[in-house]
Amino acid sequence: MGNQADLSALAPRAALDDAALDQLFRTARTYNVFRDDAISDETIHQLYELLKWGPTAFNAQPARYVFVRSPEAKAKLGPALSAGNRDKTLAAPLTVIVAVDTHFHEHLPTQFPSYDARPLFENTPALIEPTIQRNGSLQGAYLILAARALGLDAGPMSGFNADLLNQAFFPDGRWKANFLVNLGYGTNEKLFPRNPRLGFDEVARIE
Amino acid sequence: MGNQADLSALAPRAALDDAALDQLFRTARTYNVFRDDAISDETIHQLYELLKWGPTAFNAQPARYVFVRSPEAKAKLGPALSAGNRDKTLAAPLTVIVAVDTHFHEHLPTQFPSYDARPLFENTPALIEPTIQRNGSLQGAYLILAARALGLDAGPMSGFNADLLNQAFFPDGRWKANFLVNLGYGTNEKLFPRNPRLGFDEVARIE
């Protein structure tokens, strides 16, 4: 650290090019209909190998992922879906249940070796829920953006019956669903006009 | 929709190149020390103009952002910071308070014109908290990745006294802090060895 070779590597990085910014943010859309192309195990692993690097508090990584792809697993998911999300989700080549591990802190000794944060959560269980809510959702966003970075399209949604889903997929109660993301290669079908966004002055200030 | 011209535009996009995937995920780090370079209003607006496109439920966009840059604003933030985060945060060129608007639903009629979701939240206030937790955190992750896409480095943290921060910055109680992100151009100083990540089989399954 601190030698010439390191310093030369520290010039600020450039912004990604416009095509990349478009793909990640500016022209990316929430898709409702996808091409039939199957999503391979290899692509699913590539997705995880990217998103896993996103930061979480204490490197706790509380999110968990069920990649629902087979007809049997889709049938298990169906009853938990809200009416407006059911058909499109059953038709999507892949649906990710972004869940959380309510016992994520068991992994802290190996994942955050510089400080043993496990007792913090064992002794103060009230810290668990906000930690999994915040960091599990951060990781869900990393998944959406990692998918787009890999050329996939995403259709995230939170309209489902969590109790039914949890009973069907997580009967032991340790994992709990946070939200769902359909993944595939989107088509223009049922792609609604893009909604507006709030202006900077409505949501932000510089102090 | 559905004509030949549309279909030709629907060939799957390619993955971003390795340098972009590195910058966003694989070699990105949580930085503790930043170069002195000031972050301009222009860069702050560029950041918002990217992150704003990330998806949220009902396009609700509940996150709010205070860009803490002046010595006066940093001094206001200082007492709320945990001891381990204080010095590095006061030294960072910019600190973002990623907050939520507890009355986000007032904007739904303009932001989600296809369906008036405002009464849903007015009539069922218990839906507000999970919606702002989940979607406000998604937007916080969009901010981190948009910053990296622009060549900035991020140092997110949740170690602060929320009551003190909210009193200092949001005395009317409408906005509430979720987490903080230092932004700038990171240096290797106090850049700790990278922590491991959980393996695919520990956190995911394909059904």
Image: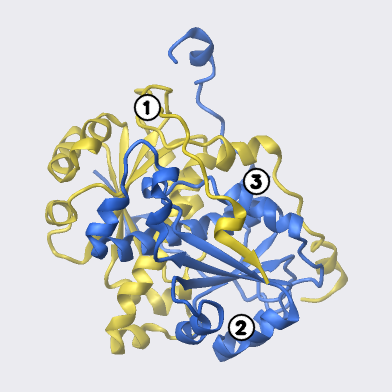
Chain colours: A blue, B yellow
Residue B191 horizontal side relative to residue A164, left or right: left
Q: Chain of mark 2?
A: A
**CA separation in Å, label 1 and label 3:** 25 Å
Q: Amino acid at mark 2?
A: Leu
Q: Which residue is labeled 3 in the image?
A: A20
Q: Do pointers 1 and 2 mark residues of a single chain?
A: no
Q: Which mark is residue A77?
A: 2
Q: Chain of mark 3?
A: A
Judged from this view, the residue extending furthest toward the right is: B4
Q: Which residue is labeled 1 in the image?
A: B34
- Residue B46 visible in this rendered orientation of the protein: yes
**Residue drawn at point x = 61 percent, y = 54 percent:** B200
Badge 1, how many Cα within 10 Å: few under 14, some, many 20+?
A: many
Residue B165 horizontal side relative to residue B205, left or right: left
Q: What is the tally of numbered marks visible in this picture?
A: 3
Q: Chain of mark 1?
A: B
- Residue B138 visible in this rendered orientation of the protein: no
Q: Amino acid at mark 3?
A: Ala
Residue A117 horizontal side relative to residue A171, left or right: left
Q: Do pointers 1 and 3 mark residues of a single chain?
A: no
Badge 2, how many Cα within 10 Å: few under 14, some, many 20+?
A: many
At numbered mark 3, what does the secondary structure look like: helix, strand or loop? helix
Q: Amino acid at mark 1?
A: Phe
C-beta proximity under 8 Å, tags 1 and 3: no
**Residue drawn at point x = 45 percent, y = 29 percent:** B193
Badge 3, how many Cα within 10 Å: few under 14, some, many 20+?
A: some
